[in-house]
Image: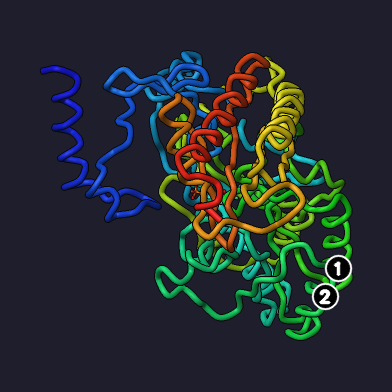
């Protein structure tokens, strides 16, 4: 069967039997799959038609060490052949989970010391939310159950994570408006303090934030923002949860995003880059103080756990992945290539009349489209999705963010990217913006 026929056959099956995550169901029925990927190598993905695309998103902000790494395959195979899975409930344990928990305690800042493992970011944030509420119960402050997160935040789509997510369409989707979740203006300390005072500090369990908001449009807050948040939390006795699901494991040019802001959270959610997507794993890292309190004050079973908490194969993959990040200096590379990427964005901003703000930290970046650099005015219909389509035709994959009236292109390439590849990326982005402008004459867009 020719590749084309194979593609068509699979595309029909995809439409019929596969409900895609975070997708347009109607569009899927019209277009079918844009790519049916069959192979990944370095920063590139290949589909069954032989197309090659640069993975400018590290797929879902997660494939930090790039695709097709044989050493990870070997680590997984070795662990699977010895012990693929065993439970960690009660006091059962396994060697990879113990070693990974130790490694995470060494690389996370401050006294973050002990990890509860999950299968991904949403479970991590649900766990963090449940954990802080449980913590306040055993501390004798059971009224502290409210969770404050920021507008434009994305914390995943399990029930607790959806409630915490500051992008309202995700909550509207399933009428997910549980009590005790509050969303505060995203870069305002005054709004945070007002909300805490209004709700009563003694009712607030935790404040949760990504160091750099990812899915909400790659927003980097002012340098002092988190220090002030930390001070506010300390003043009112509120726990600070950093959602490092995207920003962890080198993405921003430091091991963890909060390190840029000089803030040590009480709790940190991790996932994605911990395994670079080679296995499903997440975790919640808690401070020594919280761990000691849990040990001292727990009187009953810790009634929270997932079948795959501490999965030996996933943990072995994570250990090998972290080793690659360290041996290949990928955190430093993310910092250097991030600077190169931002330089490229600034060049595009000069070249293209419809580019507004550009921003980034390490290998996380965004380009806003609008009616020029000096204005925040947007076009009536967002252009970013059209640019994404043009770029895919030219061999580059990235995402658009159009929530909250934004019209942004967002990027998160693998940490192994080199200068030449960054330049190629910039060239394709600029060409794709030009193509959209050409197809839709500028006046018509306005
Ligand atoms: N937190 C952040 C900051 C994320 O970006 C994501 C996913 O993109 C999640 C949590 C949810 O992670 P998962 O999709 O692995 O459940």
Say which quarter of the image contains residue 56.
top right
Examine the rendering and report whether any part of residue 39 can be seen: yes
The disc at residue 193 is: 2
Specify whether 89 is left or right of 265.
left
Q: Residue at x 33, y 27 (%)?
A: 37
Give the image location of residue 41, x and y in percent. Answer: 45, 17
Specify whether 231 is left or right of 52.
right
Give the image location of residue 71, x and y in percent. Answer: 50, 14
- Decide: marks 1, 2 in contact (CB < 8 A)? yes
How dense is the environment of label 2, judged by Cα within 10 Å: few (below 14), some, or many (20 and up)? some
Give the image location of residue 120, x and y in percent. Answer: 50, 46
Q: Nearer the viewer, mark 1 or mark 2?
A: 2
**Can you identify the residue that label 1 sits on?**
232
How dense is the environment of label 1, judged by Cα within 10 Å: few (below 14), some, or many (20 and up)? some
Give the mark nearer the N terminus: 1 vs 2. 2
Q: CA distance from mark 1 to mark 2?
A: 7 Å
Quick one: quadrant of the C terminus?
A: bottom right
Q: Residue at x 73, y 44 (%)?
A: 113
Give the image location of residue 108, x and y in percent. Answer: 74, 39
């Amino acid at each position: 069967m020719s590749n084309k026929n194979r593609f068509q056959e699979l595309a029909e099956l995809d439409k019929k039997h596969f409900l895609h995550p975070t997708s347009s169901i109607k569009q899927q029925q019209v277009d079918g799959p844009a790519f049916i990927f069959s192979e990944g190598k370095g920063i590139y993905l290949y589909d069954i038609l032989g197309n090659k695309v640069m993975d400018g998103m590290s797929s879902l902000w997660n494939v930090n060490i790039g695709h097709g790494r044989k050493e990870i395959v070997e680590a997984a195979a070795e662990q699977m052949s010895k012990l693929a899975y065993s439970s960690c409930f009660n006091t059962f344990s396994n060697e990879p989970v113990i070693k990974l928990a130790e490694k995470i305690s060494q690389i996370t800042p401050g006294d973050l010391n002990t990890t509860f493992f999950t299968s991904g970011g949403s479970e991590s944030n649900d766990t963090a939310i449940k954990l802080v509420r449980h913590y306040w119960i055993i501390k004798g402050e059971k009224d502290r159950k409210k969770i404050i997160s920021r507008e434009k935040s994305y914390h995943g789509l399990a029930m607790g994570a959806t409630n915490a997510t500051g992008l309202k369409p995700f909550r509207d989707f399933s009428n997910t408006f549980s009590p005790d979740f509050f969303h505060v203006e995203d870069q305002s300390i005054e709004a945070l303090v007002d909300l805490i005072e209004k709700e009563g500090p003694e009712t607030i369990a935790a404040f949760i934030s990504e160091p750099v908001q990812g899915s909400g449009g790659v927003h980097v807050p002012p340098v002092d923002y988190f220090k002030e948040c930390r001070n506010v939390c300390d003043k009112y006795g509120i726990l600070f949860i950093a959602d490092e699901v995207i920003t962890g494991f080198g993405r921003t040019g430091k091991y963890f995003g909060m390190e840029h802001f000089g803030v040590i959270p009480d709790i940190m959610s991790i996932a994605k880059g911990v395994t670079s997507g080679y296995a499903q794993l997440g975790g919640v890292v808690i401070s020594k103080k919280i761990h000691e309190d849990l040990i001292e004050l727990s009187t009953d079973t810790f009634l929270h756990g997932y079948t795959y908490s501490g999965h030996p194969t996933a943990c072995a993959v994570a250990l090998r992945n972290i080793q690659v990040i360290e041996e290949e200096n990928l955190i430093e590379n993310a910092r250097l290539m991030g600077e190169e990427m931002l330089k490229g964005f600034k060049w595009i901003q000069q070249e293209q009349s419809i580019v507004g703000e550009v921003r980034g930290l390490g290998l996380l970046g965004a380009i806003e489209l609008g009616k020029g650099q000096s204005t925040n005015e947007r076009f009536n219909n967002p252009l970013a999705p059209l640019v994404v389509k043009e770029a895919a035709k030219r061999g580059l994959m990235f995402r658009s963010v159009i929530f909250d009236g934004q019209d942004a292109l967002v990027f998160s390439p693998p940490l192994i990217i080199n200068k030449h590849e960054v330049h190629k990326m910039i060239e394709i982005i600029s060409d794709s913006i030009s193509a959209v402008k050409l197809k839709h004459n500028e006046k018509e867009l306005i």
